[in-house]
């Protein structure tokens, strides 16, 4: 790293802080703070959604997989893209008509208040763990590039994200995400991929030098591909940080089309990351730690100035996901726990204050956990397993099975969570089967309890038909 590269990265951090301050001027109401006023157009929506789903794990992880497994490294991020497309094509129209803030709020309406509390706890832990991994990633990169201690690097990276997230909530996150989306796109597609291919004398030469196993789309293994599907494709559908971005769209059409475009962008990102990893396999054949593939490749092939920009793009990806995750966890706790159980008829100003204080506490916890643990990839797998295994089935049944009773949804989530945790304890924390066990237990529970108990009138007696929702809202206002 040359001084000029260091200056570029530090200037980039300063721009993010400035953008966060600008975004804070727009956060006038609690809905502005949590959902950017539900007013984003296509470009801003696409940018902020793409930025949050393609975090540091997507960038660093895909290049690592490309180095180790070749083209089959695409499956990790491709499954994230598939999940976003499923969300956009199947669920968004139904979700958008409800005008809810969190996935837990929706589950609470369909089932009962205890379901809202339980799902909020599960989802907030998951989003917190995502934020922890991003802070660790930022700390690692800053530590390597600038030579600061790992603890100092995490404090600086996490502190910057926490600062602009507290200032303006989703508006600040959106403004910074657009910057991060542009920098990330330029850094990966227009700099790293062309220069990596140039270093190996072109794509044709790369294909001839790679071992045959690196050209096999299933080389990573069918079991691993299926695990990515369970963890990430299904996880995206029930992830609060993703839902919260969906709710920022100005219309359901923008939400749907933008989600599909973000999914397609993810496929392209997966291919780009794998190509960089495969080029590194030729350029750096004796790399000690594949986790450092992206950073080592950047240091090897990029000139001064360009290097700073590209490494800033990696920080961009990490910061986007970290800020979205912090805000998602804060929103779940504020909206579904504090507001429901500890705040009596809060004003809009009180809700913004509570959101900011909760974000501060969640951010400090995330930074503390990052410094303390420093490696939470297994914990992240556990969080994804619980999210997919325990919440996916009740959410799907919310929309597609009218007969589900309030008790069935609550006990399905509770039983599934216990089953997933027990399965992970018995089979190992990286096992895939516990997710299937949890889904199966949830399906059996929700159907069995519903069929063998008397129907109980819920707030909505249909699986959230749009006309019924609008009629109910009109009744309440009257």
Image (tube, grey):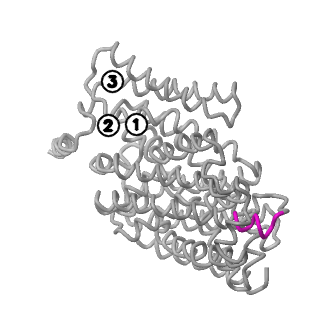
Instruction: Read off the residue under disc 3.
Output: 405
Measure the C-alpha gap from mark 2 to mark 3: 13 Å
* Residue 256 falls left or right of residue 355: left
Q: Residue furthest left?
A: 478
Q: Earlier in the sequence, mark 1 or mark 3?
A: 1
Residue 428, image x and y in percent?
Answer: 71, 31
Measure the C-alpha gap from mark 2 to mark 1: 7 Å
Q: Secondary structure at mark 3?
A: loop
Q: Secondary structure at mark 2?
A: helix
State which quadrant residue 467 falls in.
Answer: top left
Q: Would you say residue 280 sits in the magenta stretch?
A: yes
Measure the C-alpha gap from mark 1 to mark 3: 13 Å
Of residue 362 and residue 149, the one placed in the foreground of this image is 149
Q: Are marks 2 and 1 in contact (CB under 8 Å)?
A: yes
Residue 129 vs 30, above or below: the answer is above
Q: Would you say residue 141 sits in the magenta stretch?
A: no
Residue 84, image x and y in percent?
Answer: 44, 53
Magenta part of the protein: which range?
A: 278-285
* Mark 1 crowdedness (10 Å alpha carbons): few <14, some 14-19, many ≥20: many
Q: Secondary structure at mark 1?
A: helix
Of residue 49 and residue 28, the one placed in the foreground of this image is 49
Helix, strand or loop for the magenta stretch, by majority: helix
Instruction: Read off the residue under disc 2.
Output: 399
| Residue at x 56% of width, y 42% of height | 231
Numbered label attached to residue 395: 1
Of residue 215 and residue 69, the one placed in the foreground of this image is 215
| Residue at x 34% of width, y 46% of height | 90
């Amino acid at each position: 790293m040359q001084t000029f590269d260091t200056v570029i990265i530090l200037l980039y951090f300063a721009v993010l802080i400035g953008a966060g301050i600008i975004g804070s001027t727009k956060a006038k109401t609690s809905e502005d703070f949590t959902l950017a006023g539900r007013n984003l157009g296509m470009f801003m929506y696409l940018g902020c959604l793409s930025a949050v789903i393609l975090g540091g794990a997507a960038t660093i992880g895909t290049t690592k997989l490309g180095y180790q497994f070749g083209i089959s490294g695409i499956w990790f991020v491709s499954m994230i893209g598939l999940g976003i497309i499923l969300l956009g094509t199947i669920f968004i129209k139904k979700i958008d008509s409800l005008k809810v803030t969190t996935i837990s709020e929706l589950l609470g309406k369909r089932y009962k208040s205890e379901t809202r509390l339980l799902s909020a706890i599960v989802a907030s832990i998951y989003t917190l763990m995502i934020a922890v991994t991003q802070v660790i990633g930022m700390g690692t990169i800053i530590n390597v590039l600038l030579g600061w201690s790992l603890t100092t690097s995490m404090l600086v990276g996490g502190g910057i994200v926490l600062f602009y997230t507290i200032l303006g909530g989703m508006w600040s996150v959106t403004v910074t995400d657009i910057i991060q989306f542009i920098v990330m796109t330029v850094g990966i597609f227009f700099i790293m991929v062309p220069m990596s291919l140039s270093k190996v004398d072109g794509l044709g030469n790369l294909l001839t030098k790679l071992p045959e196993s690196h050209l096999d789309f299933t080389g990573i293994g069918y079991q691993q591909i299926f695990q990515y599907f369970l963890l990430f494709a299904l996880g995206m559908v029930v992830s609060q940080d993703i839902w919260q971005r969906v709710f920022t769209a100005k219309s359901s059409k923008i939400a749907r089309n933008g989600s599909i475009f973000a999914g397609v962008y993810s496929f392209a990102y997966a291919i780009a990351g794998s190509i960089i990893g495969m080029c590194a396999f030729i350029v750096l054949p004796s790399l000690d730690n594949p986790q450092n593939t992206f950073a080592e490749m950047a240091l090897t092939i990029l000139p001064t100035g360009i290097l700073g920009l590209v490494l800033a793009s990696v920080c961009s990806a990490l910061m986007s996901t970290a800020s979205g995750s912090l805000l998602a966890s804060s929103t779940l706790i504020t909206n579904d726990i504090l507001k429901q159980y500890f705040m009596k008829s809060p004003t809009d100003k009180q809700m913004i204050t509570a959101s900011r204080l909760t974000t501060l506490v969640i951010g400090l916890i995330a930074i503390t956990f990052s410094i303390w643990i420093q490696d939470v990839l297994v914990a992240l797998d556990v969080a994804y397993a619980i999210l997919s295994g325990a919440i996916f089935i009740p959410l799907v049944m919310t929309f597609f099975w009218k007969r589900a009773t309030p008790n069935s949804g609550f006990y399905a989530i509770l039983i599934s969570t216990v089953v997933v945790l027990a399965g992970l304890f018995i089979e190992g924390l990286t096992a895939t089967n516990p997710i299937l066990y949890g889904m199966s237990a949830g399906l059996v529970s929700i159907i069995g309890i519903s069929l063998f108990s008397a129907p109980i009138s819920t707030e909505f007696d249909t699986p959230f038909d749009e006309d019924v929702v609008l009629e109910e809202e009109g009744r309440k206002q009257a």
